[in-house]
Image (cartoon, helix red, strand yellow):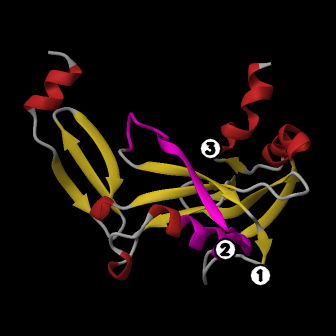
Amino acid sequence: MSLEDEYRDNPEETRWEGRFITAKTRGRWEYVGRARNIRAAVILAITDAREIILVEQFRVPLGRPCIELPAGLIGDDDSSAGEDAGLAALRELEEETGYRATRMEPLGEFWSSPGMVSESFTLFRAHGLARVSAGGGVEGEGITVHHVPLDGMADYIAARRAEGMAVDVKILTLLGPGILG
């Protein structure tokens, strides 16, 4: 039986559901997804000085800080159900980094680990950036904002790894040309 046949022939079963995460099975496959069909917005923000805006946040599943692109959940509470992804990206960028954008350009929908997570995210490019606050996220997030010159990205990431930080897979969008040679 092919995986596609197994998918069609076995119903999805929810094994556990929390506020944000759902553990599911379909046949012999185990995977997780976001509860209530919550999605994520990830923001690529580059300043006029050609610096990429990154965030650092302690991530409990990893047990250490992680360097990431700014991101957040779309429609993550009952009052924001049906939230527009672009508006969520604008909100999250300002909350996390202190930057307000005049426009968000959608670059596509992506899946970060499709063998075990059904969650997708929409990648946005922020335009018209203006610093309006220090950022840092909402209470309890403990976000640190970093401005990294685009031409120094590979060295910056290598230095953070050497310090023991985790690096989110979406950082590959910034390292791609260097990796490809």
Residue at x-position 69% and y-position 49% = 166
**Could you tell me the amino acid type at mark 1?**
Ser
Q: Residue 11: which quarter of the image?
A: top left
Q: Is residue 160 magenta?
A: no
**Label 3, label 1: how many angstroms apart (C-alpha)?**
25 Å
User: Circle 2 sits on which residue?
Assistant: 94
**Residue 67 in the image, given as x and y percentages of width and height:** 71, 54
Residue at x-position 72% and y-position 30% = 176
Badge 1 vs badge 2, beta-carbon distance below 8 Å: yes
| The N terminus - image quarter | top left
Q: Residue 172: which quarter of the image?
A: top right
Badge 2 vs badge 3, beta-carbon distance below 8 Å: no
Q: Residue 161: which quarter of the image?
A: top right
Give the label on residue 162, or none: none
Give the label on residue 170, or none: 3
Residue 79 vertical position relative to residue 110 in the rendered view, above or below:
below
Q: Secondary structure at mark 1?
A: loop
User: Circle 1 sits on which residue?
Assistant: 133
Q: Nearer the viewer, residue 3 or 161?
A: 3
